[in-house]
Amino acid sequence: MSSGVSFVDFWGNDYQKCLRFMSGIEELAKKYENSGIRFLKFNVDEDKMFAVKEKVMGLPTIVIYEDGIQRSRLVPNDINSIDDIEEFIKKNI
Amino acid sequence: MIYDIIIIGGGPAGLSAGLYAGRGKLKTLLFEKESFGGQTATTHEVENYPGILKVTGPDLSEVMREQAENFGVNISRDDVTEVDLDSDIKIVKTYEGEFRSKAVILAMGAKPRLAGFKNETEFRSMGVSYCATCDGAFFEDLDIAVIGGGDSAMTEALYLTRFAKSIKIIHRRQEFRAAKSLIKKVEDHEKIEFILDTVVEEAQGNGTLEKLILKNVVSGEKSNLDVDGCFVFVGLDPINNIIQGKINLDNSGYVISNENMETNIKGVFVSGDLRSKNLRQIITAASDGAIASIMAERYLENLN
């Protein structure tokens, strides 16, 4: 995510809310694949300290990076349906 | 299709109701939009459920779900948005559709109460948390605060010592509601300190939480506390948004029922933390669920 705009879904194995939205996020990634946003996901169980460094403090957290710098984020409380995530993507295109 | 029973909520109350309904061969549909087990799923250790010496909350929740499903309960991950309970046939609306049943068991439970300081919601999941098992690991080697003086605050503060560099427990009084044995453990822990007679007035930070503004309730003196995280354990509020104005609630918003879990609406039962009562534990939730289910079964028999 060094250059351009990236969408990063921070998720964890034990978080049902992450698993519940994962396939929906994958569909959104396909739908918006030509939008210029790069879609990535990061499993915090593989490198917790990266999540700590990025100040992820709850899961799922979705962060938009622009040229490697955090621009905006969506935290668990903001995510009630897949529509909330799509709205967030639209705002960041 | 008309179900015999629709259960709203998949914590110990809903899953126990489901287990009994499924075992009684009733056509049962259970809705759980988030985590099976409800608050149990966010409890790191359970050691007061008879017959089980010690179990993690998620493990206990998973077995409860499996047990209900084994007895034939249909489970949906859909979110209930509206209910129409007045007629003999109850209607439960969700994002995906409309479902009908002859009886409904309300088991939506309760959720952590907000502490009420300025910017609390803005910093939610940006440093302010209500679940140590969910979010604790993200505070590795950081300084955090815990707000509260009950059993939950003490238990969760002890759990958070696994990760945090330091923990300040902020409590509005000198005395604690928590069990004495727990307080002793907390007092003896080298990572934990108390800030008593104090409330949090405001959270501040650039993006994520950096600082709490505290006020001593005796002297009125204000101070700053630099922290990366703040965990709030100050009690519970009922999850009653879909039933407000439709059913009798007590002054705190919990559903009023008799000992048979019957509400003021025919065919509508309540169980677990959502019910107006004195003790909210996994065992009382499970017990309520069993009673609600059996009483719903009797109600259905009388309908036929």
Image (cartoon, rainbow, N blue to C red):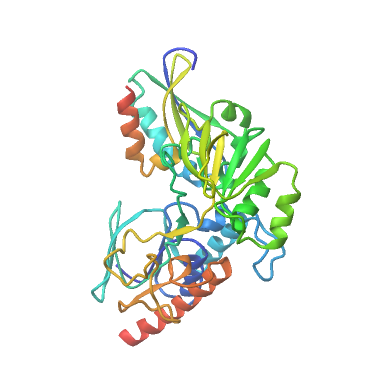
Outermost residue toward the front in this view: B219
Residue closest to the eye, A1 or A55: A55
> Which quarter of the figure is the N terminus of chain B placed in?
bottom left
Outermost residue toward the left in this view: B87
Name the spot of residue A8 as percent of width and height, x first: 47, 27
> Residue at point 69% right, 56% down?
B183
Name the spot of residue B164 as percent of width and height, x first: 66, 38
Name the spot of residue A1 as percent of width and height, x first: 49, 17
> Residue at point 45% right, 50% down?
B114
Q: Is residue B207 above or below residue B130?
A: above
Residue B243 placement: quadrant: bottom left
Name the spot of residue B87 as percent of width and height, x first: 23, 74
Residue closest to the eye, B93 or B231: B231
Residue B75 appears in the figure: yes
Residue B72 appears in the figure: no
> Which quarter of the figure is the C terminus of chain B placed in?
bottom left
Residue B94 placement: quadrant: bottom left
Q: Is residue B40 above or below residue B7?
A: above
Residue B50 placement: quadrant: bottom right
> Residue at point 37% right, 53% down?
B78
Residue closest to the eye, B213 or B155: B213
Q: Is residue B255 above or below residue B58?
A: below
